[in-house]
Image: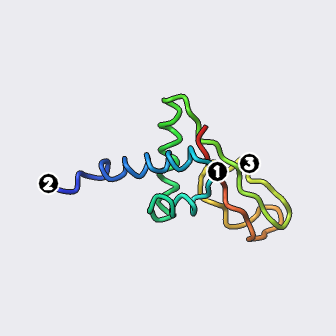
């Protein structure tokens, strides 16, 4: 089969673009989605892979955890890059998105 280059060829460029955007400063998944031109739901998967790739180069994907605006609960233990839907303490749904950067 010729033409599209397979899934690895398509995903390598977006990950590099995500890394470049994250080196500029802190961004949410929505901001990254807009900067790179990927659907927001795809950004999370790329971020997980990027975090593993950065370890090999000595860099690190840093995360500012999501926070509930109702009770100030911080989702520090959450390992997934997707924002939570509800607060486990107050059951509120007003939650800030996690922010990411590369250091």
Name of the residue lying farthest toward the bottom: 93
Q: Distance between the residues labelled 3 and 2?
A: 45 Å
Q: Residue at x 23, y 51 (%)?
A: 5
Q: Name the residue under label 3.
A: 76
Q: From the image, tell me which residue sits under label 1.
A: 26
3 or 2: tag closer to the N-terminus: 2
Crowding around mark 1 (Cα neighbors within 10 Å: few <14, some 14 to 19, many 20+) is some
Q: How crowded is mark 3: few (under 14 residues within 10 Å), some or many (20 or more)?
A: few
- Which residue is at the front of the view, 82 or 99? 99
Q: Which of marks 3 and 1 is in front?
A: 1
In-image side of 77 versus 20 (left or right): right
Q: What element carries label 1?
A: loop
| Residue shown at the point (78%, 62%) measured from the top left | 68
Q: How far apart are marks 2 and 1 (CA)?
A: 38 Å
* Residue 20 in the image, given as x and y percentages of width and height: 50, 46
Q: Tell me the tag on residue 2.
A: 2
Residue 73 screen position, x and y as percent: 81, 57
Q: In this view, does 85 lie above or below 27?
A: below
Which of the two discs, 2 and 1, sits closer to the camera? Answer: 1
Say which label, 3 or 1, has the lower sequence index. 1
Taking 93 as reference, is 99 left or right? left
| Gap between marks 3 and 1 measured at Cα | 17 Å
Q: Relative to 51, is 56 above or below?
A: above
Q: Residue at x 56, y 33 (%)?
A: 59
Q: Mark 1 or mark 2, which is nearer the start of the sequence? A: 2
Tell me the quarter of the image containing the N terminus: bottom left
Q: Nearer the viewer, mark 3 or mark 2?
A: 2
Q: Position of residue 23 (x, y in %)?
A: 56, 44
């Amino acid at each position: 089969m010729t033409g599209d280059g397979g899934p690895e060829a398509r995903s390598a460029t977006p990950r590099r673009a995500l890394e470049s955007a994250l080196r500029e400063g802190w961004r949410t998944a929505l901001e990254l989605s807009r900067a790179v031109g990927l659907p927001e739901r795809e950004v999370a998967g790329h971020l997980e892979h990027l975090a593993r790739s950065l370890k090999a180069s000595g860099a690190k994907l840093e995360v500012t955890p999501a926070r509930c605006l109702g009770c100030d609960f911080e989702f520090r233990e959450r390992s997934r890059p997707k924002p939570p839907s509800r607060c486990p303490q107050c059951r509120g749904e007003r939650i800030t998105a996690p922010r990411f950067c590369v250091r």
